[in-house]
Image (cartoon, helix red, strand yellow):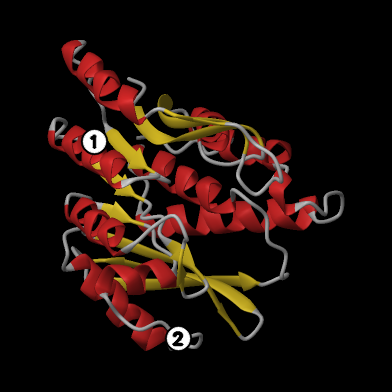
Amino acid sequence: MLKKVAAINDLSGIGKCSLSVSIPILSALKVQCCPFPTAILSSQTGFSQYTFLDLTNEMEKYSNTWKKLNLNIDTIYSGFLGSSSQIDIVRNFIKSNPHAFVIVDPVLGDNGELYPIFNKDTCTKMKDLVIHSNLITPNITEACLLLNKDYKDNFSEEEVITIAKKLSELGPSKVIITGIVRDNMIYNLSYDKEEDKAFTYGLEYNKCSYSGTGDIFVSIICGLITNNYDLEFAVKTASDFIYKCVSYTSKYEDDRNQGVMFEMFLNDLTSINKKI
């Protein structure tokens, strides 16, 4: 039977990110994506102009309706949450679906800085959400924010492994720390507490940055984990896919806000045919 993922994120009409990438990618991976929108934007916020419709007041009703329908949700995947209220709603949604595998992308900041719309209260709320997760996918900045740890540009691999282990002590059994740049390479480090195993996978860093690549990465992880692929395979597949998309897009598109041309490579995902 096709498994269901509740994908909690915003939806942007222009700029490939959030739900606009999660829906096709999860579908390509043979998983039903059940969108749970947090906001609707005409274009993602990197553009000079955009409209924004906040759906916070609808989210609780949305969740309650799904509960009344007795939907069997296999995986819950939460991405960008724009307020403490939205984090509270997602936490309650997780509690109402105790059998679901929970993936939290704790979007808080980057490059050592908290995003301007967030504050210490947001970090505290996000940490509480992480406690209720099975897998989290922070970048190194977000990992430090969750642990109240000072950020620096040059964490060693051993230090990153220690950070991942400390994050797993908060609750999630699996941790992926993304986007670690070192020696002209970009790495993703994963840690599985149940196996007490760390795994680092790196590719050449082409210094191109596009909006939405993190959402694509986590969506691939989500689809593969939902269909019982192991963490190492999921991380390798997602990393290779992003690398291919960025390399291709950089030949044709210089506006990072547009996102990558992932559509050109969806066949790579539909061709994954491991029997579950």
Residue ID at (52%, 40%): 18
Where residue 25 appears, as percent x and y from the top left, is 54, 35
Q: CA distance from mark 1 to mark 2?
A: 33 Å
Q: Nearer the viewer, residue 149 or 73?
A: 149
The local secondary structure at tag 2 comes to: loop
| Rendered position, 150 above or below 168 | below
Contact check, label 1 and label 2, Cβ < 8 Å: no
Q: Amino acid at mark 2?
A: Lys
Question: Which residue is tagged 2?
Answer: 152
Q: Nearer the viewer, residue 151 or 180?
A: 151
90 relative to 79 in the view: left or right = left
* Badge 1 or badge 2: first in the primary sequence: 1
Residue at the image position 67 percent from the left and 40 percent from the top: 15
Residue density around tag 1, few if under 14, some if 14–19, many if 20 or more, within 10 Å: some
Residue 111 visible in image: yes
Viewer-nearest of discs 1 and 2: 1
Q: Residue at x 33, y 79 (%)?
A: 161
Indicate left or right for 154 with 6 as reference: right
Give the quarter of the image for residue 82. Answer: top left
Q: Is residue 31 above or below residue 250?
A: above
Across and down, in percent, residue 216 comes to: 54, 46
Up-down relation of residue 252 to residue 155 (above or below): above
Q: Percent from the top left, x then y, of residue 34?
A: 39, 24
Q: Which mark is residue 89?
A: 1
